[in-house]
Amino acid sequence: MAQVTKRSKEEMARLWEEYGRTRTPELKNILSEEYLPIVRYVAEKMIERLPHNVQVEDLVGAGVFGLFDAVDRFDLARGVKFETYCVGRIRGAMLDELRHMDWVPRLTRARANKLEEAYSRLEKQNGRAPTDVELAADLKISLDALDELFREVSGASIVTMGRRTLDKDPNQLGVDIMEDEKIEGPLPANTR
């Protein structure tokens, strides 16, 4: 990783040595501010592989806590570059935040993914939506087990109304909005 701090390597080494001796909050803040670009870098790399409802700023916010933790725990005597050390802590804090944001248990999420993959595979293979019998056979489960699976994962497949769709116009929402002509709007009828 290239030099990410605004200060020279020598100046950063002096700051780390002084922080190692004094552990003052002021020095911790200075060091943390110097390495903030790493937080943004890690967040932007992670966001590429995440659903659209996850915001990069949420990752950055969590990553800052990981950076603070990394500054606290960094041991200059180990001879490891801080940039290398902090990336793992930052990424870990972001992953913890993602887990906290996701109220669906991992097992349910994994089952939902398996069901979705089977559905997509069969739909592509047959040129139509698969039947329950075909899905159950593909997943090697009974129809009763498939019904149970549908109930279990139904809450894991919530789509945000405002989510943008990739296969359509990026400025288009993932839902159609229709005007109800029977309901009067906030404007007088002669201005509509």
Image (cartoon, helix red, strand yellow):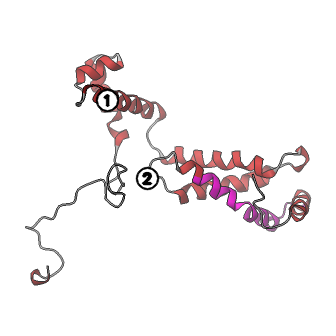
Where does label 1 land, which residue?
119
**Image point (48%, 34%), residue name:** 106
Q: Position of residue 83 (x, y in %)?
A: 77, 52
Q: Residue at x 45, y 47 (%)?
A: 51
- Given residues 122 and 33, the one toward you in this image is 122
Q: How many marks?
A: 2
**Along the horizontal axis of the image, is 97 left or right of 15?**
left
Give the spatial CA distance, label 2 vs label 1: 23 Å
Crowd rating for badge 1 (residues with CA inside 10 Å; few <14, some 14–19, many 20+): many
Local packing at callout 2 (Cα closer than 10 Å; few below 14, some 14-19, many 20+) is few
Residue 34 placement, left or right of 93: right
Residue 173 placement (x, y as % from top left)? 31, 57
Residue 60 figure quarter: bottom right
Q: Which mark is residue 53?
A: 2
Contact check, label 2 and label 1, Cβ < 8 Å: no
- Image coordinates of residue 146 in percent, x first then y, are 29, 23
In the rendered image, residue 149 lying in the magenta stretch gets the answer: no
In the structure shown, which secondary structural element does the residue marked by tag 1 occupy?
helix
Amino acid type at circle 1 is Tyr
Query: Which callout, 2 or 1, points at the residue further toward the start of the chain?
Result: 2
Residue at 16% of width from left, 74% of height from top?
185
Q: Secondary structure at mark 2?
A: loop
Q: Residue at x 45, y 43 (%)?
A: 103
Horizontal arrangement in the rendering, residue 95 relative to residue 29 (left or right): left
Image location (x, y in percent) of residue 32: 74, 61
Extent of the magenta region: 22-44
Q: Main secondary structure of the magenta part?
A: helix
Q: Is residue 140 above or below residue 159?
A: above
